[in-house]
Image (tube, grey):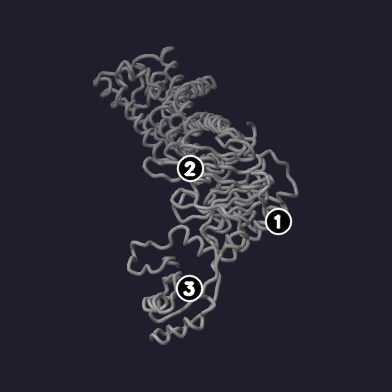
């Protein structure tokens, strides 16, 4: 098992995908931080307050004021919303679809190693990867916030942001075995990316409904808010986590079945 | 080199069948490979060779029947069997971002092998030394095949299963791979099962062949046995094959002959009357530009067994008992 895990990390050597995923995080953090000073403009805030709804609530709660807490929250929300679904989808598609895309699957599957170990090793690497992206997001947002000259830095704010980021990423990670299943089933990247796009769109459609917090892809929004919808309409409950755990279990089972039973003809 | 009828069966397929919806890729295939054999699995494109090999390696699930290798039923997670099998299926895939050395080392580490002289020997044998620092993505097709073979050999397998190992190789590469495989079979006693449609290659390497056609195993035969059963024939190059056929049949009483695609004829009976046949043809106005006695080879045998050319395309040209030959 340890050999398999080590090999999975080794396969990433000189691969461009870690760099690309890091760049996506950088762009997410940059976009969020670029917009916050605009939202901080008193005239715009007055307009938003007049419009009512969640944005008015956000203005009233001081969420668009230039502070470390607010800037760091933008970083968290950027990583855990739609952007997170697509970025993590891409990373998962790469980790699980790569061998099928590049013709190395037939070698991997004829190794004297149980196929379940391959799946577990990849899921572990995936966990390290997505949580590392979360960490990178907090780091980049912190550096950018400092560079923008926002006053009131505290380590507590950074640590809170880190905690929120990891909490928000957790339910998304639980949905990724299904993406992996699409990657193995579709032998590449197209199916998992289309699927990720699909669930993102469904999530966006559900966001104002009471079912949203039970939709694992929307849980980050209910945990930490979303970039343009910063006030959580309903909190996450134990049932939300139970659904996410169920999605994880179904995803892993489907993945194991696929890798064990499906014909590898590519 | 060369297995015997009494050697232990190391690969066995029993009633092996695979249907992909309406396509019957492999049908009730029973084959046996004995220890030490170089078994060549012959078939045209789409005959079912690759599907059979994938079923052997548990990459494809049989619709019916099973594969046993070294006494173990092949299915996903047949770890014990895979420890003793090396394989290369069609064009091997690699991690293109890693160098040749890293690809080999990763395979070695995954297999839990220690750094040893054998790995270096394999690298040298497969002529990969100068490519070790190169990224696998930049290798030519031939070198990729060599790397695939090196990876298959790295754990000193008892059985090597190769699907079209000379695919995409230039003539020199083909000779190199053949030399390596011969060496492995002769010096290390490795049992080799390889699929191919390059008959000249097979003839120089195999000790036994299995011919598959439209998913069914038509024949399993030792190469020595095949040589013994191959018939001699008189090869005639003529100006008018149709007229020549008529002359041979009507004037000379020849019953077994075949018209060749290129316009010649092969006469299987009356070889001792070559002079008489020549004369009869010339007298009938058929120009004979060449005449020699030869023997059937594997290609002839294969073509005859699998039905030769597409008969529907050239029905008017089919003459005599033995039909068309390429």
Q: Quadrant of residue A81?
A: top left
Residue identified by numbered label 3:
B267
Q: Residue furthest left?
A: A51
> Looking at the image, is mark 2 or mark 3 earlier in the sequence?
2
- Name the residue: 27% across, 18% down: A53
Q: Nearer the viewer, mark 2 or mark 1?
A: 2
Task: Determine whether label 2 and label 1 are within 8 Å by CB.
Answer: no
10 Å neighbourhood of mark 2: few (<14), some, or many (≥20)? Answer: some
Callout 3: SS: strand
- Name the residue: 73% across, 41% down: B114
* Chain designation of label 3: B
* Chain designation of label 2: B
Which percent across, then down, holds residue A56? 29, 19
Which percent across, then down, holds residue A144? 47, 33
Q: In the displayed structure, would residue A208 be above or below residue B154?
A: above
Residue identified by numbered label 2:
B28
- Taking A3 as reference, is A60 left or right? left
* Chain designation of label 1: B
- Taking A212 as reference, is B3 left or right? right
> Looking at the image, is mark 3 or mark 1 earlier in the sequence?
1
- Taking B118 as reference, is A196 left or right? left
Residue B186, label in figure: 1
Q: CA distance from mark 2 to mark 3?
A: 36 Å
> Looking at the image, is mark 2 or mark 1 earlier in the sequence?
2
Tell me, yes or no, whether dots 2 and 1 are on the same chain: yes
Callout 1: SS: helix
Residue A29 visible in the shown view: no
Nearer the observer, B152 or A222: B152
């Amino acid at each position: 098992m340890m050999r398999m895990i080590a090999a999975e990390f080794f396969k990433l050597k000189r691969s461009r995908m870690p760099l690309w995923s890091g760049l996506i995080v950088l762009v997410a953090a940059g976009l969020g931080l670029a917009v916050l000073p605009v939202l901080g403009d008193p005239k715009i805030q007055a307009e938003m307050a007049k419009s009512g709804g969640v944005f008015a609530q956000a203005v009233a709660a001081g969420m668009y004021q230039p502070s470390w807490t607010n800037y760091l929250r933008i970083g968290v929300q950027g990583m855990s919303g739609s952007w997170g679904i697509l970025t993590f989808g891409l990373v998962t598609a790469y980790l699980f679809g790569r061998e099928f895309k590049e013709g190395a699957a037939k070698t991997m599957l004829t190794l004297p190693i149980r196929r379940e170990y391959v799946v577990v090793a990849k899921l572990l690497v995936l966990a390290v990867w997505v949580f590392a992206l979360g960490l990178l997001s907090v780091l980049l947002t912190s550096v950018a916030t400092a560079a923008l000259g926002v006053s009131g830095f505290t380590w507590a704010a950074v640590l809170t942001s880190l905690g929120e980021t990891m909490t928000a990423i957790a339910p998304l990670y639980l949905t990724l075995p299904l993406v992996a299943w699409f990657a193995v089933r579709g032998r590449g990247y197209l199916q998992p990316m289309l699927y990720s796009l699909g669930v993102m769109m469904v999530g966006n459609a559900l966001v104002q409904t009471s079912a949203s917090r039970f939709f694992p892809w929307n849980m980050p929004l209910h945990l930490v808010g979303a970039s343009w919808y910063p006030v959580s309409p309903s909190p996450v409950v134990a049932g939300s986590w139970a659904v996410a755990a169920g999605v994880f279990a179904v995803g892993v089972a489907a993945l194991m079945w696929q890798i064990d039973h499906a014909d590898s003809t590519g | 080199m060369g297995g015997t009828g009494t050697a232990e069966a190391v690969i066995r397929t029993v009633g092996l069948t695979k249907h992909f919806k309406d396509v019957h890729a492999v049908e009730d295939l029973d084959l046996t490979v004995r220890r030490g054999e170089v078994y060549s699995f012959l078939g045209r494109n789409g005959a079912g060779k690759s599907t059979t090999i994938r079923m052997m390696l548990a990459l494809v699930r049989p619709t019916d029947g099973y594969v046993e290798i070294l006494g173990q039923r092949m299915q996903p997670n047949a770890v014990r069997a895979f420890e003793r099998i090396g394989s290369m299926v069609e064009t091997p895939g690699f991690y293109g971002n890693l160098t040749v050395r890293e690809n080999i080392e990763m395979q070695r580490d995954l297999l839990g092998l220690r750094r040893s002289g054998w790995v270096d020997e394999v690298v040298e044998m497969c002529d990969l030394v100068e490519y070790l620092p190169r990224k696998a993505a930049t290798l030519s097709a031939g070198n990729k095949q060599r790397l695939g073979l090196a990876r298959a050999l790295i754990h000193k397998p008892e059985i090597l299963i190769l699907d079209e190992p000379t695919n995409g190789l230039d003539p020199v590469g083909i000779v190199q791979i053949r030399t390596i495989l011969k060496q492995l079979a002769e010096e290390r006693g490795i049992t080799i099962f390889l699929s191919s449609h390059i008959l000249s290659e097979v003839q120089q390497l195999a000790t036994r062949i299995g011919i598959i056609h439209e998913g069914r195993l038509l024949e399993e035969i030792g190469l020595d046995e095949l040589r013994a059963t191959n018939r001699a024939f008189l090869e005639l190059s003529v100006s008018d094959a149709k007229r020549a056929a008529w002359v041979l049949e009507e004037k000379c009483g020849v019953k077994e002959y075949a018209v060749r695609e290129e316009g010649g004829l092969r006469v299987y009976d009356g070889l001792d009357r070559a002079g008489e046949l020549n004369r009869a043809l010339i007298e009938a106005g058929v120009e004979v530009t060449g005449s020699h006695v030869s023997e059937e080879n594997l290609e002839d045998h294969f073509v005859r067994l699998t039905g030769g050319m597409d008969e529907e395309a050239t029905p008017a040209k089919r003459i005599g008992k033995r039909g068309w030959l390429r």
